[in-house]
Every structure is written in structure tokens, then in C-alpha cells.
Image (cartoon, rainbow, N blue to C red):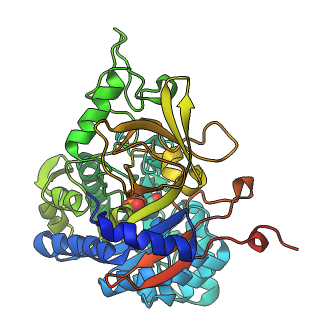
């Protein structure tokens, strides 16, 4: 669960932050980021010393955050020119930067090749572009082939599944054979290995193991053709526990009971069987809990079994059969999500559909993308005040002018009835949620984002927008 301390210290700090930066406010605690990085490094030390971490900058990027990443011995996975700039500014060497993305402009490919970054090629079309750029620079480009098209079933929410058949990312696995036979068409590219990012918030090791087995098979083929396959990259996707086990079970039980726990009858990820009864044991979409959170998923994968050319092997045995390539991972969410919280203010407490409590706050889904993209399983807590005998069960709505602007599709439980002006804390928002859909909808300013050190020192990642930031003269 969140390593962020939510006692009186936070209430005290929150008052100071509110005055200095205004609410809503996104806060990331750097010591928690460091702990998460250390945990991944430890798993590699224990189970596969040839492992390496490339932190996915898209989860949350700022040179100060990335400096902590660099100090933790990790490189970066960058997917835009500014993400690359962030990583380099933080002191991450270009050779430790992966350049990902399905729409790289020539200028980005050029920078990657000129500075010897590792280009993760998303398509055979991109290989042609990279070949032309590398040739024009008179250089050899280091390239991984990104794979997709794996038939894995429903392993996470459709919006964050990237390695499946219907994907805008990667080279379909069915086409890779033809490509491997045609590598000579790209004399300026040095094929270093294979990449797959299955998706985000993967709560079971099986999809990783299925993909790893296939990657080892293809790696053997690449090695047979080029003489080497020094890198396999398994991408990110390591899950975070938004809810602990009992809370996750309770959420599904409440939804299955159809007792008004879901907004307007929604049943979240539960579906009804032919008998019309909701199956609480099976969740469709993004899950809010995994028995293998964060680095523990990497450990489970390295201790798991894969199939290589019909043979069942331990994952490490399979990697050994390929000559122990460097095993890269690109964790994003699992490094920063539980290091972050969002603070906002209660503006109204009222009723919806006559009988349900509804709290409205001073931000919308543009400041909490998880609610729109991933189902909004995050926990909420109210700062201050004594607990009442009955918890206050409520939906929480945003302040934007559209009905889908709900921050909780399920009722959340607060320790007392909130009042206008109270501060609400939204947990586990360090990755994506605060900035991914950040916009000026309704001309609201985008909130500030700050990084907090162990000693309370602050780096402002982004100041709250002012009028002139929204409206150019
Ligand atoms: C190529 C790639 N690598 C890594 C990640 C990070 O994934 P996660 O935050 O789930 O660890 C992403 C996320 O979209 C990605 O697209």
C-alpha cells in the first residue's frame, strides 16, 4: 500500500502547501520513489543480475524526479522529445535512454541515432525511416523490435492493453518472421533484440511468461541470423495495489449486491451470467489489486516457467539458453504511483438521485485521469476531525460541465461527514493520473505538481496555471 504517511504531519504540511501552491495539488514523495526503484534493483540482484531498469518517463517526468531515477542506477524510457530532454537534463546518459512511441518524428529519430540512444522501433515503416536517418548521419543505429499481436485474453483494461492483436503499437507477431528474413535491407541498423510492452496494471505473471517465452524463441532466431541478441525488453505494466486484498474483495461483493454502491447501477468490472447474477469472482478491465504488486511481479516472472519451442523451462533457464541477454524492464506506474497523492477541497455536500450522498470537489477528471481511463479505484481520505459512529458513504464528483466527470464510480467511505472547505486526499496518484489528461476544460487552471524530499524540501514540477497561461494575448 502507499508508503506515504497520512497522519498529522500530512495535515500540517497540507496547510502550508495549500497556502504556497493552492489546491488542488499533486504531491510526489521522492523517498517513496527511491524505495520502489531499490525494490526492482534488489529483485534483479537476487534473481537475474543482468537486469536493468529504464524508468518510463511518461508516468511522471521532471528532471529532479529523473535525477533520483539516475541516482537509483536506472535509465529512462522516453516517448517524446521533451521526455528525452528531461532524462538527459537529469544526467541520464543517452546510451541509457530508450526511445519509444508509435509516432516518432524524424527529428526525434535523428536525435536518438545521433546520440546513440536505443531506438525501440514500433513498425517496419519506422525501420525504413531509421535506416534513412542513420545512413544520412553515417552512423549505425541501435534498435530493438517492438512486438505486439500476442493473444493473451483480457489481461488488463482495453484502454491500457498495448500488446494484443488490436493494437496501434508494435510489429504484429505474425509479421515478424518476414521481417527477420529481411534484416539485410537495413544495413545501418544494429538489431540488439526485442521489446514488448504488454500493457499497464497487469495483475498476474502469466502474460509476462507467455510473452517472455515467445521473445526467447524469436531472440534465438535473431541470434542465428545476426550473431547476437544482447537485449530482451519486457516493458512495464507492474501493478500497484490501489486496494488491499480485503478491500478489493469487499468492493466486488458490494457491487455484486447491486445495493446502490455503483453510480447509476454501474457494476464496474463485474458481468452477469446467463442467470442474471453478477459474478464477483471475475473482474473485467483494470483491476485494483494484485497478489504480486510492483517489483514482486518481476520476481514472480523470473521465478516462473515459460515455453520455448515446446519445452517448459524456468524463465532464467530460458534466458540462459539465449546467452543471458540484458533483461530490461520499463516500469512507470510501479515506481511513482504510490509515491503520489492529490489534495483537493470539498465545495459541496448534497444528494444524488434523492438518496445517495454526493460530494463535489474543486477539480475534475482532467486532474484525475484514472477515474476516466482505469475505473477510479483509488482510495479517498478526509483530513482532520474525529471519526463519527457511522462512516459517511458517498460518491465524489468533479466540477466540470459534463456528466461523465465523476471521480468515483463507486461509493467511497469517509470517516465523517465532510464540510465545505475540508481537504480530501486522493491516494496513489503519482503516475499518469494528475497530468495525462490535464487540460484547461472550463478554463480551470491545471493544478501545481510538487516533489517532496524526505526533509520536507520541495521542487515545483509545475506551477498552477495563471490566467495568462490559458489565454495568449
Ligand atoms: C513502451 C512502454 N513502456 C513502459 C510503459 C510503462 O508502463 P507502466 O506504467 O504500466 O509500468 C509504457 C506505458 O504506457 C509503455 O508504453
Q: Which residue is outermost to the right?
A: 473
In the rendered view, tell whether residue 128 sits above or below residue 153. below
Image quadrant where residue 269 sits: top left
Image quarter hosting the C terminus: bottom right
Viewer-proximal residue, 215 or 95? 95
In the rendered view, tell whether residue 310 sits above or below residue 226. above
Residue under the point 60% across and 38% down:
404
The picture places residue 264, in percent across and down from the top left corner, at 52, 25
From the viewer's perspective, is 135 left or right of 153?
Answer: right
Image quarter hosting the N terminus: bottom left
Residue under the point 48% across and 63% down:
182
Q: Can residue 78 be seen in this view?
A: no
In the rendered view, tell whether residue 346 sits above or below residue 49. above
From the viewer's perspective, is 316 left or right of 168?
Answer: left
Image quadrant where residue 153 sits: top left
Instruction: Locate ligand 1 by image quadrant.
Output: bottom left
The picture places residue 340, in percent across and down from the top left corner, at 40, 65
Q: Which residue is outermost to the top?
A: 275
From the viewer's perspective, is 98 left or right of 463?
Answer: left
Count of residue discs: 0
The picture places residue 283, in percent across and down from the top left corner, at 33, 33
From the viewer's perspective, is 279 left or right of 426?
Answer: left
Viewer-proximal residue, 52 or 181? 52
Viewer-proximal residue, 349 or 108? 349
Image quadrant where residue 272 sits: top left
Q: Can residue 270 be seen in this view?
A: yes
In the rendered view, tell whether residue 106 sits above or below residue 269. below
Residue under the point 34% across and 19% down:
278
The picture places residue 425, in percent across and down from the top left corner, at 42, 57
Amino acid at each position: 500500500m502507499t508508503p506515504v504517511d497520512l497522519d498529522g504531519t500530512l495535515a500540517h504540511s497540507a496547510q502550508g502547501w495549500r497556502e504556497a501552491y493552492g489546491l488542488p495539488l499533486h504531491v510526489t514523495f521522492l523517498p517513496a520513489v527511491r524505495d520502489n526503484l531499490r525494490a526492482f534493483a534488489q529483485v534483479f540482484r537476487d534473481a537475474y543480475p543482468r537486469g536493468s531498469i529504464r524508468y518510463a518517463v511518461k508516468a511522471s517526468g521532471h528532471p529532479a524526479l529523473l535525477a533520483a531515477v539516475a541516482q537509483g542506477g536506472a535509465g529512462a524510457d522516453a516517448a517524446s522529445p521533451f521526455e528525452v530532454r528531461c532524462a538527459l537534463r537529469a544526467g541520464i546518459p543517452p546510451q541509457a535512454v530508450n526511445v519509444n512511441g508509435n509516432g516518432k518524428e524524424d527529428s526525434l529519430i535523428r536525435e536518438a541515432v545521433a546520440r546513440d540512444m536505443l531506438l525501440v522501433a514500433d513498425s517496419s515503416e519506422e525501420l525504413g525511416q531509421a535506416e534513412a536517418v542513420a545512413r544520412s548521419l553515417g552512423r549505425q543505429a541501435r534498435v530493438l523490435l517492438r512486438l505486439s499481436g500476442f493473444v493473451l485474453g483480457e489481461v488488463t483494461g482495453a484502454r491500457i492493453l498495448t500488446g494484443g492483436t488490436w493494437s496501434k503499437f508494435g510489429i504484429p507477431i505474425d509479421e515478424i518472421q518476414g521481417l527477420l528474413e529481411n534484416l539485410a535491407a537495413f544495413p545501418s541498423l544494429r538489431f540488439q533484440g526485442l521489446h514488448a510492452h504488454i500493457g499497464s496494471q497487469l495483475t498476474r505473471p502469466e502474460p509476462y511468461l507467455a510473452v517472455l517465452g515467445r521473445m526467447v524463441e524469436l531472440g534465438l532466431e535473431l541470434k542465428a541470423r545476426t550473431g547476437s541478441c544482447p537485449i530482451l525488453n519486457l516493458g512495464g505494466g507492474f501493478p500497484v495495489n490501489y486496494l488491499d486484498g480485503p478491500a478489493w474483495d469487499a468492493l466486488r461483493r458490494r457491487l455484486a449486491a447491486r445495493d446502490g454502491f455503483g453510480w447509476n447501477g454501474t457494476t464496474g468490472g463485474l458481468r452477469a451470467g446467463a442467470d442474471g447474477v453478477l459474478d464477483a469472482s471475475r473482474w473485467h478491465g483494470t483491476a485494483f489489486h494484485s497478489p504480486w504488486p510492483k517489483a514482486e511481479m518481476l520476481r514472480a516472472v523470473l521465478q516462473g516457467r515459460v515455453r520455448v519451442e515446446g519445452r517448459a523451462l524456468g524463465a532464467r533457464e530460458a534466458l540462459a539458453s539465449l546467452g543471458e541477454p540484458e533483461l530490461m524492464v520499463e516500469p512507470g506506474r510501479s515506481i511513482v504511483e504510490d509515491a503520489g497523492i492529490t489534495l483537493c477541497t470539498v465545495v459541496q455536500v448534497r444528494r444524488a438521485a434523492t438518496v445517495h450522498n454526493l460530494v463535489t470537489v474543486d477539480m475534475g477528471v482532467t486532474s484525475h485521469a484514472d477515474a476516466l481511463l482505469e475505473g477510479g479505484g483509488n482510495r479517498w481520505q478526509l483530513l482532520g476531525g474525529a471519526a463519527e459512529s457511522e462512516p459517511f458513504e458517498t460518491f465524489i464528483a468533479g466540477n466540470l460541465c459534463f456528466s461523465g466527470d465523476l471521480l468515483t464510480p463507486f461509493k467511497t467511505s469517509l470517516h465523517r461527514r465532510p464540510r465545505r472547505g475540508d481537504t480530501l486526499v486522493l491516494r496513489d496518484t503519482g503516475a499518469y493520473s494528475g497530468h495525462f489528461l490535464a487540460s484547461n476544460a472550463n478554463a480551470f487552471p491545471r493544478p501545481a505538481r510538487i516533489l517532496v524530499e524526505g526533509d520536507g524540501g520541495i521542487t515545483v514540477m509545475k506551477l498552477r496555471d495563471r490566467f495568462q497561461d490559458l489565454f495568449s494575448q
